[in-house]
Amino acid sequence: MKGTTVTTERRFSRRIPYLAAATAGLVLLAACGSSSDDSAPGTPKSSKDAAASGAQAADSAAIPTQDVVSAIAADPALRAELPAKARDSGKLILGTTRTPGTVGLPHGGEQNGTQIGLDVDLRNAVAKVLGIEWDVQYGTFPTVIPGVQNGRYDVGQDNFGATKEREKVVDFATYLNDGQAFLGSKDTPVDTVKQLTDLCGLTIATAPGSTFQQILTDGAGKCAAIGKKPYKVQYFADNATILLGLQSGKVDVSFGPTLGVKYEAAHLPGTKYLGEVSTTPVGFVTAKDSPVAKALSDAVNKLIATGDYAKIFAKWNLPGSGLTASQLNPAPSF
């Protein structure tokens, strides 16, 4: 994540006529993401506009709408863990990024002017338990963690995976497990990826400043070491552009958060899930030693205990991605 060293993670076929419908069914660090205003250098604005336009034509019937949050009751004991300023105002400032349309699902998106997605339901459920409201403020992926560090935001949320570098500068209160996985088109010449050397000779698209970039950079010499042609990496800050490149055949594989990649494989005809190479706990981030982190973790554990947490994951059809318990600053996998 950036602002430290590495930013966030978001989800990032070969048929251009399908793209509008495909991106409509969606809007993938860390895991583990990007603001709609952030294009990688050289990204054609027309590509972004085409994808965004397609996202507006989303099939609303395909997006779950059940209310799994409003009936959740506040817990006065957990509210008491918050700083006095938050208790008095009844608010916490949340820094995140805005993803228009449905290309960022299941983590986040927007429909009819309303923010939707797994992450949105989870944060709103936590707010209900703590008896507060979120003052949601939008930044860009590289600025959310620095915004938490400098006090602009009380909490950051953007599918941030807990890594050694990130835990040096912010605290984590985990709320799900995600990972790092690959999506290919039906014509991608591999069907399974278990290690980076399965991708030798291919072109991979991912987000800059992400854990995905870190993994690909660290493994850059592995193909040559076994006598194979290295893989190439292209970086794009906008997931819709990555999907466009995948469908047009300009890239062979996209690399992003497992939950997003699996969602894309299930909703984008002509694509296939290739596999996951690692997993990462994901959490809310707060300033180091902030009491807010423990309150958030305790609220997630309360949701797990009441069954409301499981209802949220069931809504988004994500079995096996939930936690048995939220942790503060879990041991990072890398």
Image: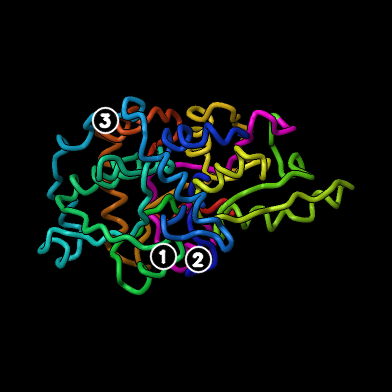
Circle 2: residue type? Lys
Determine which residue is flagged by label 2.
2
Q: Residue at x 45, y 32 (%)?
A: 21
Of the numbered discs 2 and 3, the one sitting upstream in the chain is 2
Judging by the rendered image, the residue that carries numbered circle 1 is 145
Dots 2, 1 in contact, CB < 8 A: yes
> Of label 2 and label 1, which has the lower sequence position?
2
Instruction: Identify the residue shown where x is 28% and y is 61%.
Output: 137
Task: Report how far apart the C-alphas of labels 2 and 3 lie in the structure.
Answer: 33 Å
Instruction: Point out the stretch of residues depicted in magenta.
Output: 161-190
* N-term-proximal mark, 1 vs 3: 3
Is 50 situated above or below 2? Answer: above
Judging by the rendered image, the residue that carries numbered circle 3 is 65
User: Of 76 and 250, which appears nearest the observer?
Assistant: 250
Left/right placement of residue 44 relative to residue 129 reads right
Q: Is residue 177 visible in the rendered structure shown here? A: yes
